[in-house]
Amino acid sequence: MEGLTLQEHFATLEDPRIERTKRHQLLTIITIALCAVICGADTWVDVEEFGHAKRAWLETFLELPNGIPSHDTFGRVWIQSSFKRVLSRGCKRSTPSCPLSKSPLMARQPAAPMSAPPARTRSKW
């Protein structure tokens, strides 16, 4: 059985952002968030920290001319897009034990912005 690439899976996802505010490609934001959540990220701050910690690896398959998106960018894209719905659908198709289905990020309602967690002294990545 041959699987879909991320680009193929998310091809129908519309980018809700206005053109002048697009510093990062939508697929880049989705890919980093997806990888971070699979690795245990629970907040958008965690997703951003994961991106910074794994930047060298991410650059082997993503173009990051403007660096890693901020936690605010991840949150805005999540709230504005149908990304959550598409991701949920894809996760349910893949396996019932998908780590994304258990993530607090998936449980959040898109209308409510995610708050920052308490400050940490060390990154978990």
Image (cartoon, rainbow, N blue to C red):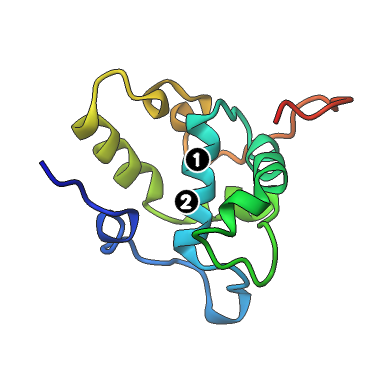
Q: Where is residue 4 in the image (x, y as percent from the top left)?
A: 22, 51
Mark 2: few/some/many CA within 10 Å (<14, 14-19, 20+):
some
At horizontal 19% and vertical 33% (from top left) the residue drawn is: 93
> Which amino acid lies under the numbered mark 1 shown in the image of this protein?
Cys
Q: Position of residue 86 (x, y in %)?
A: 30, 46
Of residues 37 and 53, the one drawn nearer to the viewer in this rendering: 53
Marks 1 & 2, CB-CB < 8 Å contact? yes
Q: What residue does disc 2 label?
A: 31
Element type at marker 2? Answer: helix
Of residues 55 and 104, the one drawn nearer to the viewer in this rendering: 55
**Distance of mark 1 from mark 2, alpha carbons?**
6 Å
| In the image, residue 8 above or below residue 117 | below
Mark 1: few/some/many CA within 10 Å (<14, 14-19, 20+):
some
At horizontal 41% and vertical 29% (from top left) the residue drawn is: 100
Task: Tell me the quadrant of the picture where the C terminus can be found.
Answer: top right
Compared across the picture, whether 104 is left or right of 12 comes to: right
At horizontal 25% and vertical 60% (from top left) the residue drawn is: 8
Residue 35 bears which disc, if any? Answer: 1
At horizontal 51% and vertical 33% (from top left) the residue drawn is: 37
Query: Going by the picture, which residue comes out furthest to the right?
Result: 121
| In the image, residue 115 above or below residue 102 | below
Q: How many marks?
A: 2
